Amino acid sequence: MHDASQTGSGYPTQAVGLPQLSVIIPTFKERDNVVTLFRRLEKTLLGIPFEAVFVDDNSPDGTWEVLRALSREDGRVRCIRRIGRRGLSGACIEGILASSAPCAAVIDADLQHDETQLPKMLTLLQGGEFDLVIGSRYIEGGSAESFNRQRAGASALATEVAKRVLRVEIADPMSGFFMIRRDRFEALAPQLSTQGFKILLDVVATAHGDLRVKEIPYTFGSRLHGESKLDSMVALDFLGLVLAKVTNDVVSLRFLMFAMVGSLGLVVHFAALYTALEIFRIPFAEAQACGAVCAMTSNFILNNFLTYRDQRLKGLAILRGLLLFYLVCSVGLFANVGVAFSVYDQQPIWWLAGAAGALMGVVWNYAMSGLFVWRKR
Ligand code: GDD
Ligand code: MN
């Protein structure tokens, strides 16, 4: 039986004033919103011991500085400042894992979510009947009044895809507002994707129907200050998540994108080779080298903007990354030719040998790029 006043280890938490609820707030450029949000949390959670864990991705507007100051005023506030990383899902996961209460809520910093629902959500979780309570826009009583038509359409489409493809049976799997029991979350955490926006969908899909879910309606309001960080690239992240979940994490979007960029590189290579040979009349060997350099450079740029946009290299790091990428790809080419050659030796089928070589090359380049070029900091 789940007893709200007990932690898993059986210690009464209320007695020593430990938090009953951890509120996780991911932030990126929310300087003008965070204090207002905390004041509202304080008001609505009066009498409930809670902690507020902000996770800021080193916002250039200095959100984390505002939060540091706030945490010097109020011990319930903490701010995790992440450097060199971006991503809403990853921020939420780290925030929850760094918190301590038996229940954890995720809420946006811009006041679009209705924080006054939190006490009700907590009561529902503490009742022991549910593992996850979702603030839902798409059930009776809920709405998304601030959405424009385009955003509403995209949200509805993504919800449909999630329901059909991932067999998720909740009305608003795209919601960014929910509360979950920590023990359930901790169990799922290792399988969650840190890329993208859709943490709730990931949680529900990963649990395979194993969570007892309750949805409660709320109205998705308008942002207080600043602007949304969701861009059209979020659609890619969403597809990536669906793909990873459907294939049981065998195919990652990152790899697929890396391979797609690689195929495009082939086109660049031939275009450059042709131009060098036909227009500049450069000898073949030099023209071929020129094609390879052009292809590697364009691959690097595209990967930096798309495949690894959450870890995008900037400034001088771009140059260093590019040189490392050249190195990785050159070795990859040897691996490619080596494998193709040995396959051809066994079975002289040119396309089979060629494909084996190319596969070897792309797997090598992908693995090594992840290790050396866009390595996790
Ligand atoms: N740490 C961190 N890193 N926080 C981020 C990042 C990031 O890369 N990107 C966004 N955030 C924070 C924002 O500062 C904000 O507090 C919250 O995540 C939501 O971001 P918004 O940019 O305001 O997103 P939205 O309003 O367009 O969409 C939100 O609401 C939808 C409906 O509930 C998100 O929560 C969506 O996931 C959700 O579907
Ligand atoms: Mn928002």
Image: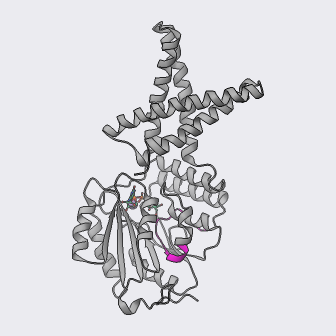
Question: Ligand 2 quadrant?
Answer: bottom left
| Residue 307 in view | no
Instruction: Estimate the x, y position of residue 141 in percent, counting from the top left.
Output: 51, 74
Instruction: Estimate the x, y position of residue 124 in percent, counting from the top left.
Output: 51, 83
Q: What residue is rendered at 57% in x and 38% in y?
A: 364
Confirm whether the magenta stretch covers residue 184: yes
Is residue 119 shown above or below 345? Answer: below
Q: What residue is rendered at 43% in x and 65% in y?
A: 94
Instruction: Estimate the x, y position of residue 274 in percent, counting from the top left.
Output: 53, 14
Is residue 284 shown above or below 346? Answer: above
- Where are the magenta residues, as a range? 170-185
Give the colour scheme shown.
one colour
Name the residue nearer the viewer: 222 or 116: 116
Could you tell me which quadrant the N terminus lies in? bottom right
Say left or right for 315 vs 215.
Answer: left
Instruction: Estimate the x, y position of residue 147 in percent, counting from the top left.
Output: 44, 58
Q: What residue is rendered at 53% in x and 31% in y?
A: 331
Say left or right for 50 vs 141.
Answer: left
